[in-house]
Each structure stands twice: as C-alpha cells, then as structure tokens.
C-alpha cells in the first residue's frame, strides 16, 4: 500500500502538489503515458511504479487488465502471477489470494485519485464492464482510455458508456483493409484514437487519422530518438517505459 507521503508528488518547480488536484493536460502536447507504470524505473504495474512515474510528472499511466475469479479487475500484464512459488492464473484466483504487490484497478484510484489519464489494455473482454464501473464510481470515466486489438469487438463496448475513450490498438496485424478504410470505420463507430507502434507511424498516417477526428498514440517509444521521432510526427500520445526520457524530450522539443 502506498503511504501518505506518496499521496503527494513533486512538480518540476519543486512545489508539492496533492495527487487529488486536477491534472491539467496541455492538449497542444502529447499525453505522456508511463507504460506499465514506467517499468524501466520500477517493478511493472505496481503501486510503487505508478507513484514514481506520477512524481516525475507524467500525464497518465498505462496498464493491463485481467479479471480475478471473483470478478475484480486486476492490473497485470500477464495472466499468471507467482503465488507461493508457483505460477497461477489471475482468472482462476480470488483477489484475496493474489500477492500484495499485484494491485486491483480500484487500488489505483484509492491511492492516486481520479485526475490522471489512464490507458488500459483489456486482456480479458469480460473485464470491460467492471472496469468501466470502477472508473465511473470514482468519477474518472472521461480520463479512461480503453485499448483492445480487435476493433470489431471493442466497438460494441461504446454502448456500455458514452464517456470513456475508445482506442483501436491493432498491434502487429495493422489494418490490412488500408488506413483510409480503417480510419473511416473507427470514426463511424465511436472511437477516439488509434494506437500504433512508434515505428509504424508516418506523417501521412498522422494526417490521415487526424482528418477523421482520431487521436494518434505511439507505443514502444523507449529510446530518446524514438520519442523525438514521435514528437516530430505530431502524435497525440506517447507510451514509454522511461518517464524521464519522455518529459525531457517534450521540454526540449
């Protein structure tokens, strides 16, 4: 559990700010997401990692969601976690039996409040409704970005709630039907953004998806040159394991 001292974080000017204060996002600059909480600096998807990334000044946190056997959204990249020296699936484990360092989604809001951008990869489609319910409970639904690799499935989730942000995250398979057709389909089905590997973005793709009113997010941007390239293309969000590198790149851009 994150202690009271970690409920506050340092801004760049050194002044202490409470985590529950409204986090202002400069829409002229990309949203900076600490990937898996900034796993380059701390153990991934832990409250300590989230706290450290927030203390550095990122705009948002990226994580992954599985559903425990008792229906609780859990933040973990992998379905299997170590329990008493054995690997066990989260989906077959009660939340009370999970290791303390594996947080639930609700733990995140309990410790850090509702004012950060949160990007979640849905690993188990059954997790979507309880995940949205928790974000709604904490009045954080408008800052929730939901990512999934199959837009034909995730487009149906828009009917659950109109206020969260829906992100197409096609991964390696890309969009075989072509960028223009994918952009049009997403714009017609309530999507807010598309998330591609940094190396897959081109200036043409950014212009295309922007034309259809979609934000462009770049993941796997860990090296300074990758972050600089994403910035030069005009993307709207960057995911990196290294919070300091993102912040430095934006400050120097």
Image (tube, helix red, strand yellow):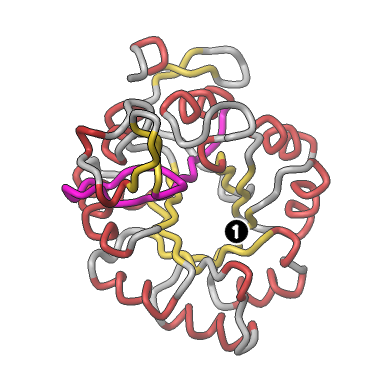
Location of residue 124 with respect to 213 vertically, above or below? above
Residue receiving disc 1: 217
Query: In the orientation shown, which residue stands out farthest toward the left?
Result: 70
Please rate how many residues cluster around mark 1, counting C-alpha atoms within 10 Å: few if below 14, some from 14 to 19, many from 20. many
- Residue 113 part of the magenta segment: no
Residue occupying image coordinates x 24% and y 44%: 93
Query: In the orientation shown, which residue stands out farthest toward the top?
Result: 5
Please tell me whether mark 1 sits on a helix, a strand or a loop: strand
Q: Give whichever of 43, 234 is nearer the camera.
A: 43
Q: Quadrant of residue 21?
A: top left
Q: Give whichever of 216, 210 is nearer the camera.
A: 216
Q: What span is colored magenta in the figure? A: 57-79
Q: Give whichever of 146, 69 is nearer the camera.
A: 69
Q: Residue 118, how many percent across, how many down?
A: 43, 45
Q: Give whichever of 208, 75 is nearer the camera.
A: 75
Residue occupying image coordinates x 22% and y 53%: 130
Location of residue 76 with respect to 197 vertically, above or below? above
Q: How many labels does the image show?
A: 1
Residue occupying image coordinates x 66% and y 61%: 197
Location of residue 144 with respect to 81 vertically, above or below? below
User: Seen in the image, is 81 located left or right of residue 184?
Assistant: left
Residue occupying image coordinates x 38% and y 51%: 144
Q: Residue 132, how many percent across, how many down?
A: 26, 54
User: Seen in the image, is 60 located left or right of residue 20?
Assistant: right
- Residue 62 part of the magenta segment: yes
- Locate the C terminus by quadrant: top right
User: Seen in the image, is 19 located left or right of residue 10?
Assistant: left
Location of residue 141 with respect to 248 vertically, above or below? below
Q: In which quarter of the image is residue 182?
A: bottom right
- Locate the N terminus by quadrant: top left
Q: Residue 4, how many percent across, how many down?
A: 34, 12
């Amino acid at each position: 559990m994150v202690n009271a001292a970690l409920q506050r974080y340092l801004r760049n000017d050194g002044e202490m700010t409470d985590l529950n204060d409204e986090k202002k996002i400069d829409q002229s600059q990309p949203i900076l997401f600490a990937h898996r909480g900034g796993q380059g600096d701390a153990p991934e998807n832990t409250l300590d990692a989230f706290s450290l990334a927030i203390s550095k000044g990122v705009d948002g946190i990226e994580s992954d969601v599985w559903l425990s056997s008792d229906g609780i959204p859990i933040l973990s990249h992998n379905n299997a976690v170590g329990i008493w020296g054995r690997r066990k699936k989260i989906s077959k484990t009660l939340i009370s039996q999970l290791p303390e360092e594996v947080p639930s989604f609700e733990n995140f809001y309990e410790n850090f409040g509702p004012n950060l951008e949160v990007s979640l990869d849905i690993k188990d489609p059954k997790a979507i409704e309880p995940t949205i319910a928790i974000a709604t409970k904490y009045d954080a639904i408008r800052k929730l970005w939901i990512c999934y690799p199959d837009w034909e499935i995730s487009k149906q989730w828009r009917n659950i709630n109109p206020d969260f942000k829906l992100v197409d995250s096609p991964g390696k398979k890309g969009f075989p039907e072509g960028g223009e057709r994918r952009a049009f389909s997403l714009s017609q089905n309530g999507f807010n953004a598309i998330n591609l590997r940094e190396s897959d973005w081109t200036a043409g793709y950014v212009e295309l998806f922007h034309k259809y009113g979609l934000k462009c997010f770049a993941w796997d941007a860990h090296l300074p040159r990758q972050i600089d390239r994403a910035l030069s293309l005009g993307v709207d969000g960057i995911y990196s394991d290294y919070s300091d590198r993102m912040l430095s790149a934006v400050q120097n851009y």
